[in-house]
Amino acid sequence: MRTSSVPYREAQSWHHCAVHAVNHLLQRRECSVWEFEDIADELQRRTGGIRHKAPLGLGGYSADVVLMALKRRELEAVVLDMRKPEEALTRLRGETVVGALVNEVKHPAWWQFWRSERHWLAVLRRVRTRPGGQGDQSEWLVVDSQDDDRRPPEPLSDEAFLAYVAAALPGCVVFLVYR
């Protein structure tokens, strides 16, 4: 992963926010739309026709597609239970945690009926050594392909990350990603 202070970021293209979010988490362009399309088609065949993407290659990928793309890169993801803050804090501080993928609910205007109601974004975890050698401290940085003004511009502490998700992203699903 890159250690630059400015994170790798891709701009939103169609409904490919899931591809962008995984690339943001990896901090490089590794996943492609074609790979996600192939994964979605494979899952659709396996599940007897259940749809895992929008038609015509527009994106809108399901969580199953994202999880399979992570698995191909030897990464795992678990849902972070936001109803249990103490347990969530403990999980955030795990040694093998690389970040989080958030699937948030979007409420498009009535005239945007064709738009997806869900959006993927990445939250990078950076571990920094505290001054004076007093252990490590996590920082969480939100990286979004839509560059939304509601996103915090500065890194967040573990507690601030959980508070941000609870307040700014109600109804979202947080997938904690680890090696």
Image: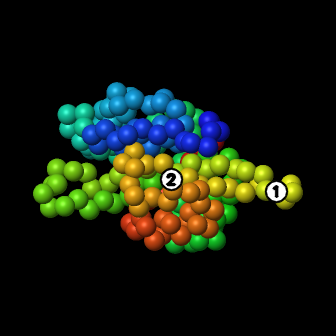
Which residue is labeled 2 in the image? 142
Pick whichever, 68 or 29, lies toward us: 29
Residue 1 placed where, x, y %? 62, 36
Determine the image quadrant of residue 106: bottom left
Residue 96, relative to residue 40: is it above or below?
below
Q: Nearer the viewer, mark 1 or mark 2?
A: 1
Q: CA distance from mark 1 to mark 2?
A: 24 Å
Instruction: Indicate which disc residue 131 carries.
Output: 1
Left/right placement of residue 113 relative to residue 64 reads left
Query: Which residue does the image show at 20% across and 34% down from the upper left?
Result: 56
- Amino acid at circle 2: Val
Residue 118, relative to residue 6: is it above or below?
below
- Amino acid at circle 1: Pro
Q: Is residue 6 visible?
A: yes
Q: Residues within 10 Å of mark 1 (few under 14, many from 20)?
A: few
Q: Secondary structure at mark 2?
A: strand
Residue 6 placed where, x, y %? 56, 42
Quarter of the image for the C terminus: give it: top right
Query: Which residue does the image show at 55% across and 42% down from the upper left?
Result: 7
Left/right placement of residue 60 relative to residue 124 reads left
Q: Earlier in the sequence, mark 1 or mark 2?
A: 1
Pick whichever, 119 or 134, lies toward us: 134
Residue 148 placed where, x, y %? 38, 55
Left/right placement of residue 6 relative to residue 31 reads right
Residue 88 placed where, x, y %? 60, 65
Q: Secondary structure at mark 1?
A: helix
